[in-house]
Image (spheres, helix red, strand yellow):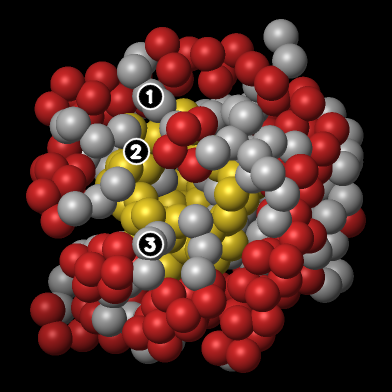
Amino acid sequence: MTSLLNIKYPIIQAPMFLVSNTAMVIEAMKGGIAGCIPALNYRTLDELRAALKELKKAKVEGGSFGFNLIVNKSNIKYKGQLEVICEEGCDFIITSLGSPEDTIKQAHKAGIKVFCDVVDLKFAQKVENLGADAIIAVNNQAGGHRGNRSPEELIKELVSHCKIPVISAGGVGCKADIDKMLSYGAAGVSVGSPFIASVEANVTDEYKQACVEYGAQDIVVTERISGTPCTVINTPYVEKIGTKQTWLETVLNKNKKLKKWVKMIRFSIGMKATQNAATKATYKTVWVAGPSIEHTKAILPIKEIIKNLVKD
């Protein structure tokens, strides 16, 4: 992976909705790793284009940057985002939640590598056949929307059946975790939650401090954010509202005609709740994070977090 992305350490600073920004990615590149931002963190295409220009200008030798694209039909901004990214250029795109076929075609024309989120062998082989440059293996230790397989089980299966590099996503908070993922056959790792409690992150100090004070045992899986399992910190508010769908959502989700709309409404409500919790003071604290916050002991600059990840 260090050769694939021309970086010093085999680490991607994972794209995190609402959290990732250009300041974080610039510091990631300075620290010898790659950084990635969800395109949906920008409300307009002009803002996305400005971010691309800023990152290209700030790019350092031994650092790479990319953007994450939600490639299914629910993202009405997808085609415009892909066009802007290909026009401006970056090192890589990470695709999520849909077929990456068109993204791979357009990105490769622009000289951009494409890595694809997968949770099992079936989809890994599909994206490999479509021409993906690497697989992001999202395991059951990932923060936010996660997979169902353990890191060891998923990595070993994908490595033994796929020819392209496998990058592990989930469960990395220290050097020992990185070594473990590499020992399973991963070419590198994608790390998200440890970077939430960074000086450069544009989220509230309360969110950052929660990542310091809570640990792996405080992470729960909830269906109340997007309708699909998502890991969050088990704050008093999360305990109060519960982690399962309401009885009405459960009933409506069994109706084929209504299921799509119920999910869209739940996603909209859930995303608004996480946005409010991440960016302003509110008692409705729904903070997305993974169990790797166990190793987060202080709010630090990105460069210090990277040093902690790569030192024994």
Among the two numbered marks 1 and 3 on one chain, the one whose residue lies closer to the N terminus = 3
Q: Compared with residue 257, is residue 1 higher up or lower down, i.e. above or below?
A: above
Q: Quadrant of residue 258?
A: bottom left
- 282 vs 59, nearest the viewer: 59
Callout 1 secondary element: loop
Which residue is depicted at the point 59% across and 49% down? 64
Picture coordinates of residue 212, whole percent (x, y): 81, 37
Q: Compared with residue 82, is residue 120 higher up or lower down, i.e. above or below?
A: above
Quadrant where the N terminus is found in the figure: top left
Among the two numbered marks 1 and 2 on one chain, the one whose residue lies closer to the N terminus = 2
Residue tagged by mark 1? 186
Callout 2 secondary element: strand
Q: Quadrant of residue 210?
A: top right
Type of amino acid at the residue the image marks with label 3? Gly
Which labelled disc corresponds to residue 111?
Answer: 3
- 241 vs 47, nearest the viewer: 47
Label 1 Cα crowd, 10 Å radius (few <14 / some 14-19 / many 20+): many
Residue tagged by mark 2? 137
Type of amino acid at the residue the image marks with label 2? Ala
